[in-house]
Amino acid sequence: MTRPCSVRRALRAAVLTAAWGALSFAGPAAAQSPARSPARSPTQAAAPARTAAPRRPFGTLREQADVQQRWLEKRMRTVLPALMRKHGVDAWVVPMREYNEDPVFSSLVSPTTFAARRRTIYVFFDRCAAAGRADPGDGSCVERIALGGTSQGGVYEARRAMKAVSGDISGRQAELWGDEQWQVLKQVLEERQPKVIAIDVSRTFAFTDGLTAGERDGMTEALGPAFASRFRPAEALALEMIATRLPEEVVFYGKLQALVWELTQRMFSAEVIRPGVTRTSDLVWWWRQQVNDMGLGTWFQPSIEVQRKGMTEAQLGEDPVIRRGDVLHCDVGITALGLNTDTQHNAYVLLPGETDAPAGLTAALRNANRLQDFTMEELRPGRTGNEVLAATRARMRAAGIDGTFYSHPIGKHGHGAGPLVGLWDYQDGVPGRGDAKAIANMWFSVELQATTPIPEWGGQPVRMAQEEDMVIPADGKPVWAIRRQDRLFLVR
């Protein structure tokens, strides 16, 4: 998801929605021609309407949360200790306040925790590294302590205050609060004496810049110069903790991608599109409603674009009616179980008598497929985003294709933690954010476009923008999460 014009289209779509008023949305075509309901007898009128059972492709919310909790527990046992060893960190301290959470927060907590509790300080300490012992790989080396908040289902040792609450008949202890938390943190560190205390500070990556100025000042003052001198920015640690995915998540991601494909193919079909009637905003809201009805979400407003023979984008306007002979493009996403997708697919609306898209449009899609091949072959662990960008652009020029690359990591966030492979308006490299390295078990949205003159359109250039999610498994060889689009969807 990247095109700036999608924002304008989203605003236009919102205005049009208000104008529709009370139209029932059984689909764009149905909304245009409401049918008269047949007369019903008094008995029929009194009978309650039957409601179809909701479609829950990934189970109930509770079932989804159970899966996410198992993922969290495994990540804490396997991913976190290995990353702390890799980056030479024996202690990692992550303090935050309610509604001002560190970006790494969602990678450290249960799916039932939506915000920090007053103040929450997570402390991770590698006892084995401190003692010079090897890590057995079962997660037992790293202590996980929560100073504020809950144990997250037993993932953390939750510390509370030592005083009882006046008038509370349950006998509960008070929660840690204010400066008391810093003093307990100091005690925890004095008992363990870490050599390196990783903190989330960065001038390059938003994902690793979660320690606010207020929290850093409070912690520095409370701990004193001896501990403060051991602070070290944890850029790579936090970035890779967010970005690293489990094999179990890869399996689920394939199912989520299959749902994306099902919906894009339905959206780009006669089931939803009525040429000459359906507008692009109809498809935007069809997508949103389908995803919402399944109990799922999205991390951005979808966009639909039209390219038409003999017309410019400005001539088409911001919410054109779809006509036969149009090339359609979508940019859509789904959020489920804390993971995100980002997909761009293309379609062609057949003219009367046509059974396939013109050969020039098929060739244009093939050019975009070649750029995908270049990215998949160049993007591998140990290479920076800028290195991948330079290599793919060199191969593109050698192939005589006109296009741009702007791939990004995906997973816990839509525009995820890790290296950027270009931006749509920065094709010479992205300083800082493009200098990070890809790692195994990282996911990417391979996002790019190829622009090709179409003979059947009098040489008019057509932009084939594609975006497909892929995974880099443990062996370092990228594979598509499910597949990539190598044929235009056809609207009959």
Image: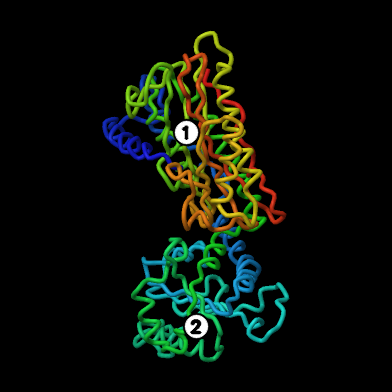
Closer to viewer: mark 1 or mark 2: 2
Give the residue type at disc 1.
Cys
Q: Position of residue 444 (x, y in %)?
A: 57, 48
Q: Is residue 39 visible?
A: no
Q: Earlier in the sequence, mark 1 or mark 2?
A: 2
| Residue under the point 39% across and 31% down | 25
Q: Position of residue 465 (x, y in %)?
A: 50, 33
Crowdedness near tag 1: few (<14), some (14–19) or many (≥20) residues, C-alpha within 10 Å:
many
Q: Nearer the viewer, residue 91 or 448?
A: 448
Q: Position of residue 383 (x, y in %)?
A: 61, 54
Q: Is residue 75 above or below residue 184?
A: above
Give the residue type at disc 2.
Arg
Q: Quadrant of residue 86?
A: bottom right
| Residue under the point 61% across and 46% down | 470
Crowdedness near tag 2: few (<14), some (14–19) or many (≥20) residues, C-alpha within 10 Å:
some
Q: Position of residue 230 (x, y in %)?
A: 49, 83
**Secondary structure beneath label 1:** strand
Q: Is residue 371 visible?
A: yes
The residue that label 2 is drawn on is 230
CA gap, disc 1 and disc 2: 49 Å
| Residue under the point 58% across and 40% down | 394
**Secondary structure beneath label 2:** loop
Q: Is residue 28 above or below residue 391?
A: above
Q: In screen coordinates, is 214 left or right of 398?
A: left
The residue that label 1 is drawn on is 330
Q: In screen coordinates, is 16 left or right of 364?
A: left
